Image (cartoon, grey):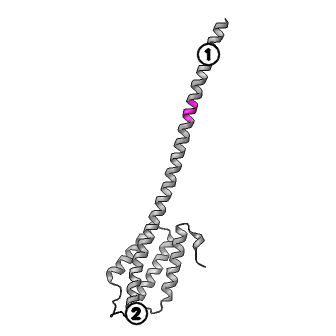
Amino acid sequence: MASDVSAFATQIIALGGVLAGAAATLAGQWINARSARTKDAEQRIRDARNELKAVIMRFLDTTQRVEQSLDTARDDIEGGPQPSDDELHAMWLAVKEVIISCSPELGRAANTYSDALQAQARKRVTDRSPKRIARGVFLDAARMELGLEKYLTE
C-alpha cells in the first residue's frame, strides 16, 4: 500500500510539473505577444508621425520656393520674376496633401498661408504682414500636429 501511495504521489508530482511547465509556457507566450503588440503600436505611431512630418516639410519646401521668388521680385534683383505658375501649382498641390493627410486645423492653416502667398504673388496685396501671420499660424498648427505644443509661439 505504501508503494501504491508513493507511486501515486510521484505521478501527481510529475503531472503538477507538466501543468506548471505548460502554464509557464503559456504565460511566456502571452507576455511575448503583448510585448510585440506594444512594439508594433509604438512603431505605427512613429511611422504616422514621420509621415505627417514629411507632408509638412514638403509643404514648407514649396512655400519657401514661392516666398523666395516673391523676395527676389520685391528686391528687384535683376528684374526678378514673380513665382512661376509651376511653383504656385506645386504649392497648391502640397496644400491638398496637407488637407488629405493632416488635421482639418492644419489643412485650414496651410490653405490660409497659401492664399496669402498667392495674393502677394498676383500683386493683389503689397503688405507682407498677412503672409507672416499666416505662416506663424501654420507653424503653430504644425507643432500641435506633431505633439510639440511646448514650442508654440506666444
Residue type at tag 2: Asp
Disc 2 packing (10 Å; few <14; some 14–19; many ≥20):
few
| x, y percent for residue 148 | 56, 68
Which residue appears at 45% of the width and 71% of the height? Answer: 56
| Dominant SS in magenta | helix
| x, y percent for residue 145 | 52, 68
**Residue lying farthest front?**
77
Q: Which residue is mark 2?
A: 75
**Mark carried by residue 100:** none
Tag 1 secondary structure:
helix
| x, y percent for residue 24 | 57, 32
| x, y percent for residue 142 | 51, 72
| Residue 115 among those drawn in magenta | no
Q: Which residues are magenta?
A: 22-26
Quadrant of the frame with the C terminus: bottom right
Compare residues 144 and 100 and report the one nearer the observer.
144
Disc 1 packing (10 Å; few <14; some 14–19; many ≥20):
few
Q: Which residue is mark 1?
A: 10
Camera sees residue 115:
yes
Which residue appears at 51% of the width and 46% of the height? Answer: 36
Camera sees residue 95:
no
Residue type at tag 1: Thr
Mark 2 or 1, nearer chain start: 1
In-image side of 83 versus 108 (left or right):
left
